[in-house]
Amino acid sequence: MAAEFQALTVLLLLVIVKFCQLAVYPYLRPALPKIYYGLAYPVSILLLTLISWYLGLLQLPVQLALIPFAVLFGFAIWKKQISFSEIKSNAVFDVIFLAGFVLLLAVRFAYPGIIPSGEKFMDAAFLGSIMNNPVVTPADPWLGGAPLTVYYYLGHWMCGVLGILAFGSNTVVFNLMLPLVFGLAAVSAYSVGACLFDRRRAWIPTLVLLIPNIALFVRLALGEGITTAFWNSTRVIGSVPSETINEYPLFSFIFGDPHAHVLGCFNQLLFICLLTVLLVKWREIPVYGKYLLAVLLSLSLGTMPAMNAWDVLVYAPLYLAAAGVAVFLMVRDREGISLHDILPLVLVPFLSILSYAPYLLSMFSSGVSSIDGIGIVSSPSALPLFLGVWGILLFIVFLDCMKTLKKYWWLVIIPIVLFFFGYGTAGVCLFLLLLLLLKKDKHVDTFFAAAGCILLILMEIFYLNDYMGDPYERMNTVFKIGFVCWFILGSSAFMMIGRWIRGRFAGVSRKRFLTAAGIVYLAVIVVLTGCALGFSNGNGGTLDGAAWMSSEHPSDALGIAWLKEHAAPSDVVAEAAGTSYQYSSRISALTGLTTPLGWAGHEMMWRPDNGTISEVSADLKEMYENPARTVSLMDKHNVKYLFVGEVEQANYQVSLPDEGLLMVFSTPGCAIYQRV
């Protein structure tokens, strides 16, 4: 795909994001002192997502979602609420967003391939399906267009709509998903710092996106290559390979799979920032601003079930705790509490449910749930391995509690005793939790650190029972809840560091500070891009995620190019039933076109009726191998095109009828037939 087209897509995407941010920021001033301009980036994208989702629900063009932003922008201009001087004074937020975006853009340019590794094929298929036909509920391209009620797809919807507005190709937009999310996450994390510190310390919370775990350094010290060390650093806790997954943001962004848990991370940091405002500024915010902050909290919290459902399991209780603390502080300080101090906080749970109520109804009515109760962990994590994942963040929290430890030194007996009962990891976290609660000088970071310790304790005692089964029953709990915990505990740790170094940069001139920041930023780009090149196997140098196929699977690449040019978005293409994590279902993955059955293993995990999936798999085999039934089975599954490439030839003894099919594309190793 032409470099000029890729560059134009990037530029248009950035223009749309900036336009939405400019349209929203004037209206956030009452609720978000100091940080309204920066948080307008993630808030405006969540609003665009919400509006476009309801347009899709009503079967209306998603392009109409820009109209409300145009109205808001025009009204702000008319009221003179947007000024160049204000934009200039807040330009640091623009720089942070662009720095995050460009950093991940360079990483994706080095490692762009939509390859079977991880679940890139799955995420690309969802993105392509949404871009082909942006309606709610989107079609599952891997089961004949069945409703995608079995998966939290809103992050893919968000990026797909932006891709449509930017006139992008799905295989290019795929590689803009993570740069967008990283930029939004960076400006959200920076806003946490800007809310608490001066601008020279505001950048510190953004380190939560860049810090690795101790296991990575250990693996590198043992002589492992960078790609192997990165991978193994996310498979630390457990007695067998991949018993659990302990991904952290730096790995996830380099690895490049725009999975739901990664797409939702900017919203996590936005919510943490909003909770910080609630805990620190609630008494100072005017009445209108309190209701506005409640709406923003509701929007962020309400987005979570459809973007990454695991997030809301943590952040809903965390909000209740933060709201309770805010009320307690007002009561403790004997301030007069009015209805307007309490009512906005009470409204948040209800408004969050209402924000995507039709989605929640469709999810519950589908009858599909991957969680079936709570189990007790029989083999808690070994302490050295646990510290290999969480050691850096826990050590920072420990340092912040040193003064308290001097007074309550006898608490060290807790982890020692629990270690002998097999719960040493929970004992360490309980020890830190008690120190945090006993601190005399509590800060907002104390709240988040305590929440992180509680999460780690719970993960060492309980797990959410899903479809994984023994010995992998803890995998998703440690993976998904642990990923959430990284942001909560990590944000608190870097808030603590920001508090420690107050005044340390006062003697550094602005020029030297910016020069040092620029050098560090360039060094980070070089290092992370080098890591990404290690994953790419020489297939970098583009933003087109399908470019690698031209050299490794040239016949399939030509067939896919033909389909993207000639097939209608609603056409169904038959290809071999897919095997998870293998080079299969690649046509639907890279075009977004519907196929009767994609990765069968994934569909079996999502759908309770495995008999249907087995039936479709059998029908595909007959479609390719039994000429007498090919046409009738194509009609049964509404198939317009039959793709015969290397995967089909390897999986089936292909034998097709002479009538009812027209060969519309042919190249050595690949042919496409159309039902006539």
Image (tube, rainbow, N blue to C red):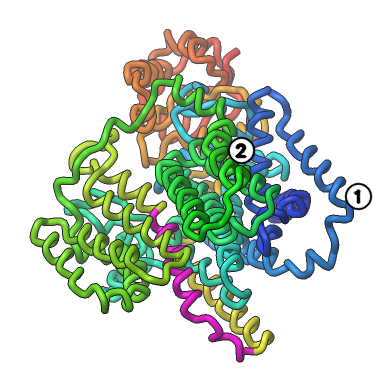
Counting from the top left corner in percent of width and height, residue 116 is at 42, 44
The answer to whether residue 478 is visible is yes
Identify the residue at the far left of this view.
Answer: 420
CA distance for labels 2 and 1 = 47 Å
* Marking on residue 78: 1
Q: Nearer the viewer, residue 326 or 625?
A: 326
Counting from the top left corner in percent of width and height, residue 291 is at 65, 45
* Marking on residue 652: none
Q: Which residue is mark 2?
A: 561
Viewport quadrant of the C terminus: top right
Mark positioned earlier in the residue sequence (2 or 1): 1
Counting from the top left corner in percent of width and height, residue 528 is at 49, 68
Whether residue 119 is situated above or below residue 644 in the rendered picture: below
Which amino acid type is shown beneath numbered disc 1?
A: Trp
Q: Which segment did they paint magenta?
A: 485-508
Secondary element at tag 1: helix
Determine if the magenta segment contains residue 109.
no
Q: Nearer the viewer, residue 668 or 568?
A: 568
Quarter of the rendering containing residue 33? bottom right
Secondary element at tag 2: helix
Q: Main secondary structure of the magenta part?
A: helix
Whether residue 204 is situated above or below residue 650 in the rendered picture: below
> Residue shown at 63%/35% (left/top)?
131
